[in-house]
Amino acid sequence: MAILNSKIPEGPLEQKWNNYKANQKLVNPANKRKLDVIVVGTGLAGASASASLGELGFNVKTFCYQDSPRRAHSIAAQGGINAAKNYQNDGDSIYRLFYDTIKGGDYRAREANVYRLAEVSNLIIDQCVAQGVPFAREYGGLLDNRSFGGALVSRTFYARGQTGQQLLLGVYSALMRQVNKGSVKLYTRHEMLNLVVIEGKARGIITRDLKTGKIERHFGHAVVIATGGYGNAFFLSTNAMGSNGSAVWQIYKKGAYFANPSFVQIHPTCIPVHGDFQSKLTLMSESLRNDGRIWVPGKKEDAEAIRNGKLKPTEIAEEDRDYYLERRYPAFGNLVPRDVASRAAKERCDAGYGVGTGLAVYLDFADAIKRQGKDVVEQRYGNLFQMYEKITDENPYETPMMIYPAIHYTMGGIWVDYELMTTIPGLYAIGEANFSDHGANRLGASALMQGLADGYFILPYTVQNYLSDEILVPRMSTDLPEFKEAEDEVIGRINRLMNIRGKESVDSFHRRFGLKLWDAVGMARNKEVLTKVIEDFKQMRKEFWKNIRIPGEQADMNPELEKAGRVADFIEIGELMARDALDREESCGGHFREEHQTDEGEALRNDKKFMYASAWEYKGEDKSPILHKEDLIYENIKVQTRNYKK
Amino acid sequence: MDFTLRIWRQENEQSKGRFEIYKITNVSADSSFLEMLDLLNQQLVDKFEMPICFDHDCREGICGACGLYINGRPHGPDDAITTCQLHMRKFKDGDTIVIEPWRARPFPIIKDLVVDRTALDKIIEAGGYISVNTGGVPDANEIPISKKNADIAMDAASCIGCGACVAACKNASAMLFVSAKISQFAMLPQGRIEAKERVKRMIDKMDELGFGNCTNTGACEAECPKEISLTHIARLNREYFAAKIS
C-alpha cells in the first residue's frame, strides 16, 4: 500500500513556492525540443498549459473532443475570476484570499496548494490583460471589481457576464499562436480512451478520432489530464453535453488515485427543471446575488396560490415575504457560499414554501431597479436577463426570476501532490480534473483562477522537475507492446458496446441513472440510501452492458457510441461517489449527511475523524477500492466552524 | 406541438446529400430546438436507425458549436440567439421546418448537419493574438484603457466563432468574424503593437482559405447571434488600408 506523499516543500507557508522554484530541476532549451508532452483538454487549464509549455520549447500535442479548442466548457463561466490585487483598497491580501478559500472549502483543502493559488492569482490578471482580455473598467480606465459569495471584499474581475468566454479566448489565442509556430500540434475531435503506462510511467494515450472512428496511439514523455469534472454523471447539470469523466476514470483504473469523489458543487442559482424533455440546466451567474434578493412567500397558503397560478409574486406584500438568506445569515446575506445557499433553498422548498413547480425560489431585482435604475441593472446583467427570458419566456425586469440549485462543478477529482502529479509518475492532472484547491466547496470565481494558475504558472514549472530526468529517454515507438495492449483494451470495449444491440438508448438510461444519483448523492445524503444505491448501481452497470442500443458503425462519426462510453464510466464514477459519501460520516461543504447537522440545520463537521482527503485506489472490476487518507494539517489558519451569520 | 421536418442527410463529404422527411408529435413548446432533435433521435434509435448528427455542446449559447440553417436562416427565426437557445414556442403547431447545415465552400460537410469549421481556427492561427508569452508582463492596471474603448473591444470580443455570418453571406465571406478579432485588438493599446501585421496576415489567410469578399449586404450582422455590428467591418477595412499604405 503506497503512502501518499504530498511533497509539500519545507519552509514557512509564504516561502514554500519560492523555495520550490529555487530548488527545482529545470530542462535546458536544447533538451526541451526533444521532449514530448501530451495535454488532454483545451479549457482554461489545458490550453494555458499547452501554450506555456509550447512557448518554453517543449514539443506539445494537445487533444480535445470538440471541433475547436475554443469550445471547451470553461467558456460558459459567467461571473468572474478572483485575484488578491486589492485594487479596491478594501483590505484584500494574498493571505485573505487564501483564508477565504480554505474556509469556504470547509477546511478540507491542502494549505500549501491554496496559498500558492492565492499567490499566483495576481499574475493571472496581468497575463490576461496583456493578451487583450477586455475586462470591465471604471471610467478612469482602471479595472473594475465585484463581490462574490463567501468574501467580504470585492476581488472578482469580470468581462460582463462572459468572463469564462473572454479568458478562454485569451488562452485559445495564445494556444493558436503556438500552433502557428509548430510547437503545439492540435488534435481536435479526438477523445482520449486509454492511458499507456510503460515501466510504471505514463508514456502515452490511445484516442479515437470522432470523425472517422480511427483508433490512434500517441507517445509523450509526460501526460497532462485537463479534462474537467464529472458533473455530467447526474445527466442534468450545467456542464456541456460532451463534458465527461472518461479520461479521469481511465487513469484511475490505471493506478491514479481518485480523491474526494463525493465533493460535488450544487450551484444555487440555476433555472429550475421544468420538463422531462430537458437536456441540461442553465446557470444564472452568482454575480446576480450582488443585486438580487432571494425570497419565498412567508405564508404557505401564498406559496400554494402562486403554484396554482392564482397569485403573482409581485402581489405578495413586503412583510409577507421571507428573505430567508438575509434572515438566517445577516452578515453575508444573499452572498453566503454556494453550498449554504443551495441547502437553504432546498430547506424552504421541502418545507412547502417553494414556487413554480414547488422546486424553485425567487431571485428578485425590483429593489435594485428601484435603487439604481433599470439602465444600471441592464448594463451589469443584461445578457443574463436576456438568456433567462429566452429560456423561460418571462421578463425578469418585471417579475422575479425563479431559480433552484443544480449540479455545477466537482471539487473531487484525481489526487495530485504539490507538483500536480498523480500517483502515476509522469502523469499530471490540472484544473477541475484534480482535487486540489477547493476542499469540500468551491467559492465563486475561483474555478477560472485555479484553471489558469495550474496551466500558466504551476505546471510549466513542476513538470520540468520530472522531465529533467527524462532527457536521455528517446521518443518511444508506438509499436511497443504496451501501446498495443492499451489499444486492444479500447477496441475490445468498443466492440463489446457495439455488439450489445439491446433495447434502451444511452440517453434514456443516463437520465434514469442521473436521477438516482441526484436522489442519493445530491444535496442531502444518508447512510441508508447510500448503502442501497451502491448495490443499485452495480445492478445498473450489468443492465447497461446487456441492454444498451447503439445504432451505426464504429468506423464512422457516431455520437451514440461516444455517449455510451462516457455513460459506462459515469455509472462506475457514481458508485465511487456513493462509497466516498458513505465513508465520510460528517457534513462538510457540499457534502451534507442528514445524520450530521446542528439543531439549526447547519452542516456539522467532524474534524477529529475526517480532517483528511480521501484517495481511492482501484483494485479491479467487482472489487472494492481501497481508501487512503491524506491528513490535512492546518498550521497557518485556525480551524473554526464556518459561520456566515455574523 | 406537431411538426414535419425536412432534414439534410449526408453520409460524408464525398457522398451526395438529400432531404429526408420526418414527422414528430407531442413536442413541448418549452423545449429547445435541439431538445426537439433529441426527441427525434430517440425515436430513430428506437427503430435502430442512425440518428441525425449535429454539432452542439454547451447548450447555453456561448460555445459556438451548434449552428443549423433553419427555414433559410442561420440559427432559425428568433433574433440574437444560437440554435441551442431557440425554443419551439417560436414555431406554429403543424409547421414544416427545413433544417440544413451551414453551406459554404470553406466549411465541408462531415456528416448530416455537421460541418468542418477548422478554417476559422486557421484564420486566428494566422494572427488573431497578441504575441506575449506567459509571465513577465506589466501590472494589469499599468495601462489605463478608457471604458468606452474597453466596451467596444468587449462588443467585438463576444464573437463565438459559430460561422453563422459565413453561412448567411451570399459570398461566404468571413469578414464579420475577422473584423470582430481585429476590432477587439484595435481598440486596446496592447493590440496596437502588431496591428498592421495582424490585419494583413488574417486577411491573406481568409482569402487563401476560399472565403468570399464582402459586398456590404449586412446579412451577417442580421444573423449574428451576438449582434456583432457592421461597424467592426468598417474598422477592419480602415485598419487594412492603413496597413497596406504604410
Image (cartoon, coloured by chain):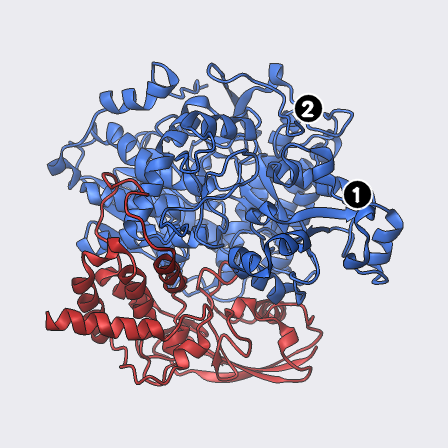
Closer-to-camera residue (A430/A543): A430
Q: A372 or A325, which is in the foreground? A: A372
Pinpoint residue A320: horizontal percent, then vertical percent.
83, 47
* Type of amino acid at the residue the image marks with label 1: Asp
At horizontal 39% and vertical 83% (from top left) the residue drawn is: B16
- Residue at disc 2, secondary structure: loop
User: In the rendered image of this protein, does residue B155 appear above or below residue A533?
Assistant: below
Mark 2 = which residue? A604
Residue B83 vs residue A360, the one in the foreground: A360
Quadrant of res A123: top left
Could you classify mark 1 by the number of other residues whose Cα lies within 10 Å: few (under 14), some (14-19), or many (20 or more)? few
Q: Is residue A477 visible?
A: no
Give the total of numbered labels. 2
Residue at mark 1: chain = A
- What kind of element bears circle 1? helix
- List x then y, in percent, for residue A68: 36, 59
Separation of marks 2 and 1 at Cα, in angstroms: 20 Å
The percent position of residue A19, horizontal first and vertical second, equals 28, 20
Q: Residue A520 at what x, y percent from top left?
A: 69, 39
Mark sitting on residue B128: none
Quarter holding the C terminus of chain A?
top right
| Residue beneath disc 1 | A350
Q: In the current view of this chain or complex, which residue is farthest to the right?
A: A301
Residue A557's image quarter? bottom left
Q: Which chain is blue?
A: A
Q: Colour of chain B?
A: red
Residue B1 to residue A643: above or below = below
Res A108 quadrant in image: top right
| Label 2 environment density (alpha carbons within 10 Å; few <14, some 14–19, many ≥20) | many
* Left or right of residue B168: residue A396: right
